[in-house]
Image (spheres, rainbow, N blue to C red):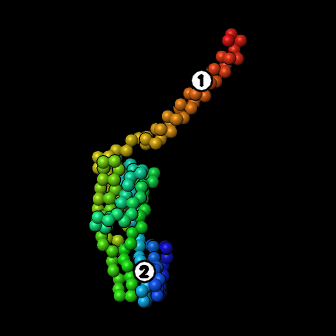
Amino acid sequence: MDSTLSLLSVNQESLVSLINSTYTFVNINDNATMLVSWYLDVHVIDSLGQNVSFANVTAYVEYTLIQSKLTDTGGLARLTLQSELVNATGHYPAANYFINASYLAYQSTTEISVSSNLHLDFILEGLVVPEFPANLILHLFIVAVLLAAILYRKRQKQKENSPIG
């Protein structure tokens, strides 16, 4: 992973997987197989250019789901996609991938061929991410209720300790 190789020899029943790695010469013998994969970095934004957290990014070959990830708070997701299979009889490139980014009812799709690391930007037209994400609003509500309960309890104790009573 993440390497530069000048000579690679794979023998017998071995399976070697290269991710984000280059090679100058490869020697594949017998029933050995080498899989070559690259990173696809996807950035998902809304109509205003704001990052979309928790967008679903999927990669399909034909109608088969290959990989799926959710974007982080920066709107980023990294997929690892196979670009070719190499064995003793030759190099076999992977089919094109359909990459889809979706959030709620908004989505965008494109078709790519992978032969190196790639970066894709998806704009989900019509989507505007709320200023405060729903999970942040929930946390703020919980904190507000907790503070209100603490203040209420404090006032009750003050009344109990008051000489007027």
* Residue situated furthest top in the rendering: 164
What is the x, y in percent for residue 96? 30, 70
Q: Residue placed at 36% from the left, 65% from the top?
A: 66
What is the x, y in percent for residue 102? 33, 53
Query: Is any part of residue 51 visible from this angle?
Result: no
Which residue lies under the disc numbered 2? 34
Say which label, 1 or 2, has the lower sequence index.
2
Depth check: 124 or 100 in front? Answer: 100
Q: Is residue 158 above or below residue 99?
A: above
Q: Callout 1, which amino acid?
A: Tyr
What is the x, y in percent for residue 141? 49, 34
Q: Callout 2, which amino acid?
A: Met
Tell whether 102 sits left or right of 152. Answer: left
What is the x, y in percent for residue 41? 40, 63
Q: Marks 2 and 1: in contact by CB < 8 Å?
A: no
Q: Secondary structure at mark 1?
A: helix
Q: Is residue 6 above or below residue 94?
A: below
The mark tally for this picture is: 2
Q: Which mark is residue 15?
A: none
Q: Is residue 33 above or below residue 161?
A: below
Which residue lies under the disc numbered 1? 152
Query: Is any part of residue 40 visible from this angle?
Result: yes
Depth check: 116 or 157 in front? Answer: 157
Q: Give the quarter of the image for residue 109.
A: bottom left
Depth check: 147 or 87 in front? Answer: 87
Q: From mark 1 to mark 2, how far is it between C-alphas?
A: 67 Å
Q: Give the quarter of the image for residue 44.
A: bottom left
